[in-house]
Amino acid sequence: MADKTFIELLFFGDIVGKPGRTAVKAYLDSLEQRPDVVIANGENISHGFGMIRKHYDEMHEAGVDIFTSGNHIWDQKEVFNFIDEVNLLRPYNFPPTSPGCGAKIFQLKNCNCEVGVVNLIGQVFMGNYNSPWDQLDELIYDMLAVTPIIFLDFHAEATAEKIAMAWHASSLGVSAMTGTHTHVQTADSKILNNRMGYITDTGFNGSYNSVIGMEATGSLQRLKSHLPTRLDVGPDDILQVNAVRFTIETKTGVCRKVERINEVFSHTGEPLQPFAIR
């Protein structure tokens, strides 16, 4: 395998249901050249809640190499049967007895380098999880001893917590970090400490005419009535892709470029055609 000066790491925000899977596959199919590694948050990939093996295989075949997740990872009980067999991470700061793992080093297919991927979950407005700060401190140096390229998905609600984690992670030597969970892409992509590519939230992939990927009527009824209401995935007539592309030096792990991707597609039954690209 050839040595490369830079790698391209493409990360897709939360994939929500079938519309999200369709949108991500269409985007990957449209690329003239695939990135060196494709990572996606897959905790909403199956009907908006959790992941089943069929949908993991579908998206892995489409070109997603590694999946991260978050608080919905256990929503589909089938995941317990395969999480240890595939490239799917759960938050590292879950209880250590949880199935699966939350940090792993992956060998890239087409170049002579490795990427460490870390998945953490926040504490503010999220739940009673172990400290993500302590957990990152615990594992980072062992990973850096193997590879200088470290990617972090911090699945968290509060923007301040994500930004604070970004400053901490960049000081430790992380190459790229994104926040997930809120499903709304932020316009603050940047490079922190002259090292780490960052965005507070990558957004989501799925139904454009929806409430963060879910059908609007049910979402409105739940919020207005305060009663339990079934939430279904939004319609697939218009689809959106939210992603971030990081360009990272292979020798140093320094991120040199961050590109925010926000595309909208019209889905008419024929091949997806972008009608608005930003």
Image (tube, helix red, strand yellow):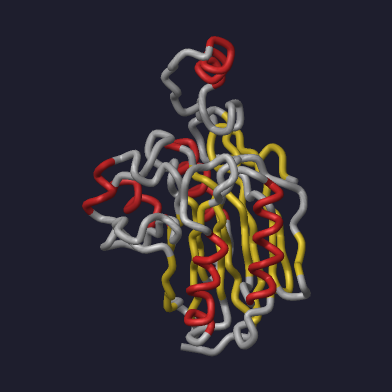
Instruction: State the residue in front, 91 or 117.
Output: 91
Whole-percent x and y of residue 64? 45, 59
Residue 64 in sight in this render: no
Whole-percent x and y of residue 43? 43, 46
Residue at point 49% right, 51% down?
Answer: 41
Instruction: State the residue in front, 189 or 138.
Output: 138
Instruction: State the residue in front, 154 or 136.
Output: 136
Instruction: State the residue in front, 43 or 100.
Output: 100
- How many marks the image carries: the answer is 0
Residue farthest toward the left in the current orientation of the protein: 81
Residue farthest toward the top in the current orientation of the protein: 225
Residue at point 52% right, 23% down?
Answer: 215
Whole-percent x and y of residue 27? 55, 50
Residue 138 in sight in this render: yes
Q: Is residue 250 above or below residue 270?
A: below
The answer to whether 173 appears left or right of 89 in the picture is right
Q: Quadrant of residue 93?
A: bottom left
Residue at point 34% right, 44% down?
Answer: 74
The answer to whether 128 appears left or right of 188 in the picture is left
Q: Is residue 278 above or below residue 113?
A: above
Q: Is residue 95 above or below residue 139?
A: above
Whole-percent x and y of residue 270? 51, 35
The answer to whether 57 appears left or right of 238 in the picture is left
Residue at point 69% right, 47% down?
Answer: 159
